[in-house]
Amino acid sequence: MLRNMHYTLYADGGSRGNPGPAGAGAVVFDTLGKRVVEVADYLGVATNNIAEYEAILRGLTKLRDEYLHEHLQGCKVTIKMDSKLVIEQLKGNYKVKHPNLVPRYLEVKNLIARSFPDVEYIHVRREFNKDADALANKAMDKGHKGPT
C-alpha cells in the first residue's frame, strides 16, 4: 500500500553565535503534501553545522519511529535543506573534515542505510526552507528563555 509513498524532509539548524545557542528544525510532508512530522529541538551550545546535521537526524528518527509499522523500506525520502555543505557531504561530493561533524555525519548515514534505502539530497535556497527555519528559530527561542 505505501510502496509508492514519498516523504520530503525539510531540515534546518542554526546557532546564534558560532558556536552559540543552537536549534534544530525539521518538517516532513507525505506524498499528498500532509505535514506528518515536525521537530523543533533546542540543542544547547553548538555550531550551525552540527545543528544542521541534528535537524536531519532528528527529523528522520521521528519519521522512522512514527511510521516504522508502515514499512518505510519501500518509501522514498527527499531531504531538502539550505546548507550546501551538509547536502554535498551527504552526497559524497565534499569530505567531512571537521572532527566534530564526523560522528553526526556517520550517524545520519547509518540511520539512512538501516531505515531509508531510497534517499535523495537537494540543496534549496533559504526562501524555500522557511518551515524548517521557523522551527529551528522556535527551538533557539525556547532554549534562550530557559525551561518553561
Image (cartoon, rainbow, N blue to C red):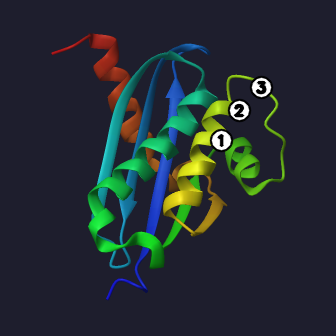
Name the residue carrying label 1: 106
> Residue 60: x percent and y percent?
44, 52
In the rendered view, tell whether residue 137 sits above or below residue 37. Answer: above
Which tag is nearer the camera, tag 3 or tag 1? 1
**Which picture quadrant has residue 72?**
bottom left
Q: Mark 1 and mark 3 in contact (Cβ < 8 Å)?
A: no
Residue at the limit of the structure toward the front, as seen here: 114
The local secondary structure at tag 3 comes to: loop
The answer to whether residue 75 of the structure is visible from this angle is no
Q: Earlier in the sequence, mark 3 or mark 1?
A: 3
Q: Mark 3 and mark 2 in contact (Cβ < 8 Å)?
A: yes
> Residue 15: x percent and y percent?
52, 22
The local secondary structure at tag 2 comes to: helix
Along the viewing direction, whichever of 100 and 88 lies nearer the viewer: 100
Within 10 Å of disc 2 (Cα), the crowding (few <14, some 14-19, many 20+) is some
Query: Is the N terminus in the top left, top right, bottom left or bottom right quadrant?
Result: bottom left
The local secondary structure at tag 1 comes to: helix
Q: Mark 2 and mark 1 in contact (Cβ < 8 Å)?
A: yes
Name the residue carrying label 2: 102
What numbered label is drawn on residue 98? 3
Q: Amino acid at mark 1?
A: Leu
Q: Name the residue at 30% across, 64% down.
A: 67
Q: Name the residue at 62% across, 53% down.
A: 125
The answer to whether residue 138 of the structure is visible from this angle is yes
Which tag is nearer the camera, tag 2 or tag 3? 2
> Residue 29: x percent and y percent?
36, 65
